[in-house]
């Protein structure tokens, strides 16, 4: 490079690049994700990014050299890049004893640092007599910062799986600017049957509330309800985890393609499954023939001359919101099919702006037990809309050809004459085939 007298010093781009080139090995830039513990898809044991936290002697079988890690774990180092810190010339060592404990339930009290997302503490209790599931959200610790100020505005929302929807979502209050929020709030699911306790899973999701943008997910925890015994309070202290991913088979290795295909099949099954639209509490009672007791008046249900079926519509819970205001105007219609004379239709009153209406209305069908065995009771819940067609919320059919709780309820009514049998039913978005619209 030559500089003439009287001219400004100028450097060409070639000379500039040549000056800035640093001879020697190029070291990779450490990313932010390398500072947080994470799980490798090929290994059930989480890997700690800092092996210096719990050193392992070189002679220990748990101390692995970088070469042995790369050869022993296959392609796992591509998913979890770690920088080994060791003595010069000796190479770094990766400690497996410094792994993070991400078990579903934690018994130790000093478990705040077990995950980068934080921990959640809550209690579950199932009241079998009232069919209620109480979830008391106690507190969270060590939550991941989500805002620019290094804090978060966390809240917890609950869903029942499978069939998660707005109808079965419950939500706590929001705690502002805290990474260790304390809620002490009890959320209650009404109409939870024993069948739900065996097949349902409760998902607790901790989110960060943002007023200007969409809310962000911090982490979640899932608990199978079959772990909760009736009328007993069970305490949980869990580590928050990321939602289970649905990876693409083309982006994974041959060893993981089977798992990915299975997850996709499970996702498609959940999408095509019936959506839960709420719960309905029904009471059925078959009254025997009253001819022997006499009585001239035929007005009241107890003074009827012939037997029949008394249907009581008690209440609904966790109905789906069908209106833009986040509520519904629900009412219930019942039919006893087949109905040749079109006289079996009954309707309740309309309850305005509620997702948990209480009706407490009863209807009577004058019918014999032999005829009732061949009938189907259709109960549907609708959202009343003024000036346009009403929206279908959900329904349930009870007959000898039903399944699950509907069949058990129907058979209990037929077998126990004169006894009032109450049971909760799940409302699905499946419209009964024989249903005639208004």
Image (spheres, rainbow, N blue to C red):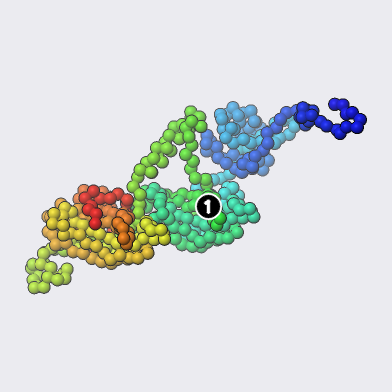
Q: Position of residue 394 (x, y in %)?
A: 31, 54
Q: Quadrant of residue 38?
A: top right
Res. 232 in view = no
Q: Quadrant of residue 46?
A: top right
Looking at the image, residue 130 lies above or below residue 145:
below
- What crowding class fits label 1: few (fewer than 14 Cα within 10 Å), some (14-19), or many (20 or more)? few
**Residue at (59%, 32%) from the top-left corner?**
78
Looking at the image, residue 402 lies above or below residue 186:
above
Q: Position of residue 92 (x, y in %)?
A: 68, 33
**Residue at (49%, 52%) from the top-left corner?**
205
Residue denoted by label 1? 214
Looking at the image, residue 343 lies above or below residue 404:
below
**Residue at (60%, 29%) from the top-left corner?**
70
- Give the camera-side residue of 366 and 435: 435
Q: Is residue 354 left or right of residue 78?
A: left
Q: Is residue 273 left or right of residue 418?
A: right
Under circle 1, the secondary element is: loop
Q: Position of residue 58 (x, y in %)?
A: 67, 33
Which quarter of the image is occupied by the N terminus?
top right
Which quarter of the image is occupied by the C terminus?
bottom left
- Give the camera-side residue of 316 and 344: 344
Res. 340 in view = yes
Q: Is residue 273 left or right of residue 116?
A: left
In the displayed orientation, state which residue is furthest to the front: 6
């Amino acid at each position: 490079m030559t500089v003439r007298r009287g001219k400004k010093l100028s450097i060409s781009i070639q000379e500039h690049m040549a000056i800035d080139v640093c001879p020697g090995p190029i070291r990779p830039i450490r990313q932010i994700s390398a500072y947080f513990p994470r799980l490798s898809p090929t290994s059930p044991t989480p890997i700690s990014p800092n092996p210096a936290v719990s050193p392992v002697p070189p002679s220990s079988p748990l101390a692995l050299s970088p070469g042995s890690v790369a050869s022993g774990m296959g392609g796992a180092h591509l998913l979890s890049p770690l920088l080994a810190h060791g003595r010069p010339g000796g190479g770094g060592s990766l400690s497996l004893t410094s792994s993070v404990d991400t078990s579903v339930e934690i018994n130790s009290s000093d478990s705040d640092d077990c995950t980068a997302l934080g921990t959640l503490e809550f209690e579950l209790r199932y009241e079998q007599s009232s069919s209620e599931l109480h979830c008391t959200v106690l507190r969270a610790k060590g939550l991941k910062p989500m805002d620019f100020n290094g804090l978060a505005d966390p809240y917890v929302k609950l869903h029942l799986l499978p069939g998660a929807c707005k109808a079965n979502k419950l939500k706590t209050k929001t705690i502002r600017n805290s990474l260790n929020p304390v809620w002490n709030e009890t959320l209650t699911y009404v109409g939870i049957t024993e069948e739900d306790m065996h097949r349902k899973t409760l998902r607790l999701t901790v989110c960060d509330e943002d007023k200007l943008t969409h809310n962000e997910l911090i982490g979640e925890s899932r608990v199978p309800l079959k772990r909760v015994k009736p009328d007993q309070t069970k305490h949980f202290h869990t580590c928050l985890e990321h939602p289970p991913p649905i990876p693409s088979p083309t982006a994974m290795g041959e060893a993981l393609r089977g798992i990915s295909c299975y997850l996709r099949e499970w996702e498609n099954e959940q999408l095509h499954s019936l959506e839960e639209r709420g719960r309905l509490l029904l009471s059925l009672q078959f009254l025997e023939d009253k001819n022997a007791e006499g009585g001239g008046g035929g007005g009241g249900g107890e003074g009827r001359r012939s037997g029949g079926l008394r249907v009581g519509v008690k209440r609904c819970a966790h109905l789906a919101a069908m209106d833009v205001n986040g509520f519904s105007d629900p009412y219930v219609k019942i039919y006893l099919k087949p109905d040749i004379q079109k006289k079996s239709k009954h309707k309740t009153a309309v309850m305005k702006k509620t997702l948990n209406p209480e009706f407490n209305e009863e209807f009577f069908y004058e019918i014999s037990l032999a005829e009732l065995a061949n009938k189907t009771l259709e109960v549907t819940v609708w959202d009343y809309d003024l000036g346009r067609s009403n929206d279908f919320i959900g329904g349930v059919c009870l007959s000898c050809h039903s399944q699950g709780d509907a069949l058990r309820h129907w058979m209990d009514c037929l077998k126990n004459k004169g006894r009032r049998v109450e049971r909760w039913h799940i409302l699905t978005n499946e419209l009964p085939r024989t249903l005639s619209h208004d």
